[in-house]
Image (cartoon, rainbow, N blue to C red):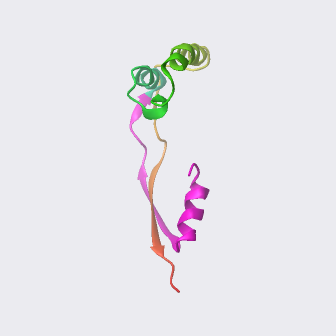
């Protein structure tokens, strides 16, 4: 699944219904520059299955694009919101 709606549909298909959301808060702060460094260093799974020759070609282009458009040193919370969703078995 890729979206919250897909998760909801899959859980509904096995008889689970959303009962409550519990907001946790924001994630840790991270700058875009640090995120890109982690990407380049292979710390993030986003690119583990991307062939090395594709990474070598694309990552420098991604970094150049990001430098032109964003402040790489500005930290933001990633994710902006963390929440737990509680489900229960639907009563028959």
Q: Residue at the location (57% across, 20% down)?
A: 70
Q: How many marks?
A: 0
The percent position of residue 61, horizontal first and vertical second, equals 58, 14
Q: Furthest-bottom residue in view?
A: 92
Q: Residue at the location (57% across, 48% down)?
A: 2
The percent position of residue 12, horizontal first and vertical second, equals 56, 69
Q: Is residue 65 left or right of residue 20?
A: right
Viewer-closest of 37 and 13: 13
Q: Is residue 4 left or right of residue 20?
A: right
Viewer-closest of 84 and 23: 84
Viewer-closest of 10 and 76: 10
Q: Quadrant of residue 38?
A: top left
Q: Residue at the location (38% across, 37% down)?
A: 28
The percent position of residue 39, horizontal first and vertical second, equals 44, 24
Q: Residue at the location (50% across, 84% down)?
A: 91
Q: Is residue 53 above or below residue 76?
A: above
Q: Is residue 6 on the magenta stretch?
A: yes
Q: Is residue 84 above or below residue 87?
A: above
Q: Is residue 19 on the magenta stretch?
A: yes
Q: Which residues are magenta?
A: 1-30
The percent position of residue 57, horizontal first and vertical second, equals 56, 14
């Amino acid at each position: 699944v890729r979206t919250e709606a897909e998760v909801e549909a899959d859980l509904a298909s096995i008889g689970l219904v959303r009962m409550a959301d519990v907001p946790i808060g924001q994630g840790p702060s991270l700058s875009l520059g640090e995120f890109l460094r982690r990407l380049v260093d292979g710390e993030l799974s986003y690119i583990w299955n991307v062939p090395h020759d594709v990474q070598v070609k694309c990552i420098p282009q991604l970094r150049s694009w990001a430098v032109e458009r964003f402040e790489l040193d500005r930290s933001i919370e990633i994710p902006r919101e963390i929440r737990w969703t509680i489900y229960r078995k639907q009563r028959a």
